[in-house]
Image (cartoon, helix red, strand yellow):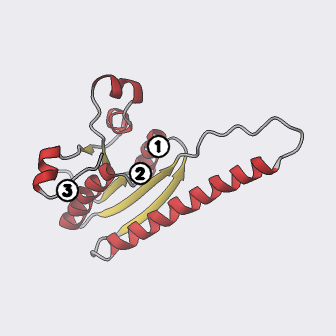
Amino acid sequence: MVTLRRILMATDYSVYSKEALGQAVYLAKKIKAALYLLHVFEPPVYTPAVSSRIGARNIAIIEWIKEMRREEGEKLLLLAKEIGRRGIKVRPILKEGSPFREILKAADDLSADLVVLGTQGRTGLDRFMMGSVAERVARKASCPVLIVKPKSRGAQKRRGVHKSG
């Protein structure tokens, strides 16, 4: 039997990640595993205007990206504190880069026993065009991966969760 001591939960703060986080927290608490909460900040693609000087506009955009990174890190710390209050040993990890690559690297660096990810549940052309971080991680990870699919709309309505739009 495999002993789960280290669970890596990757979050992008979406509704899908929240559902997966619920599963990761439940597992960590039930089996007394450490939960590593990973967020990968993926900076927006930005090409500075070609110039011999750094213009005010470029500086403003660079500062905006730094502020986004700081805010993402604060969200991660708040989420980790909230989970920690439930009696779970949680360690937040903020990385920057490609989510797919950083999740795999973190899983290897931590010797994770399990990776937990949410997925949007895309199918068909949408999945083909957008790809799936969860699917790519599941294919390449050196440990088991739990992919938590979104609950059906019917299940959400029964629970009182309604999507607008």
Q: Nearer the viewer, residue 16 or 89?
A: 16
Q: CA distance from mark 3 to mark 1?
A: 28 Å
The residue labelled by disc 3 is 161
Instruction: Please tell me which residue is depicted at 12% across the width and 49% down the height of the picture.
Output: 155
| Residue 56 spot, x, y in % from top left | 80, 51
Q: Nearest to the eye among marks 1 and 2: give it.
A: 2
Give residue 161's quadrant in the image.
bottom left
Q: Residue furthest right?
A: 52
Q: CA distance from mark 1 to mark 2?
A: 9 Å
| Residue 159 spot, x, y in % from top left | 13, 57
Instruction: Please tell me which residue is depicted at 75% across the width and 40% down the height of the picture.
Output: 48
| Residue 31 spot, x, y in % from top left | 20, 64
Q: Nearer the viewer, residue 95 or 151?
A: 151
Q: Earlier in the sequence, mark 3 or mark 2?
A: 2
The residue labelled by disc 2 is 12
Tag 3, which secondary structure? loop
Instruction: Please tell me which residue is depicted at 26% across the width and 43% down the height of the picture.
Output: 147
- Say whether marks 3 and 2 touch (CB < 8 Å): no
Q: Earlier in the sequence, mark 1 or mark 2?
A: 2
Locate the C terminus and report the quarter of the image it occupies: top left
Give the class, few, some or many, for how many residues have Cα within 10 Å of label 2's Cα (few <14, many ≥20): some
Q: Nearer the viewer, residue 130 or 29?
A: 130
Vertical relation: 41 (above or below) 133: below
Give the class, few, some or many, for how many residues have Cα within 10 Å of label 3's Cα (few <14, many ≥20): few
Vertical relation: 94 (above or below) 44: below
The residue labelled by disc 1 is 99
Residue 83: mark? none
Q: CA distance from mark 3 to mark 2?
A: 20 Å
- Say whether marks 1 and 2 touch (CB < 8 Å): yes
Give residue 9's quadrant in the image.
bottom left
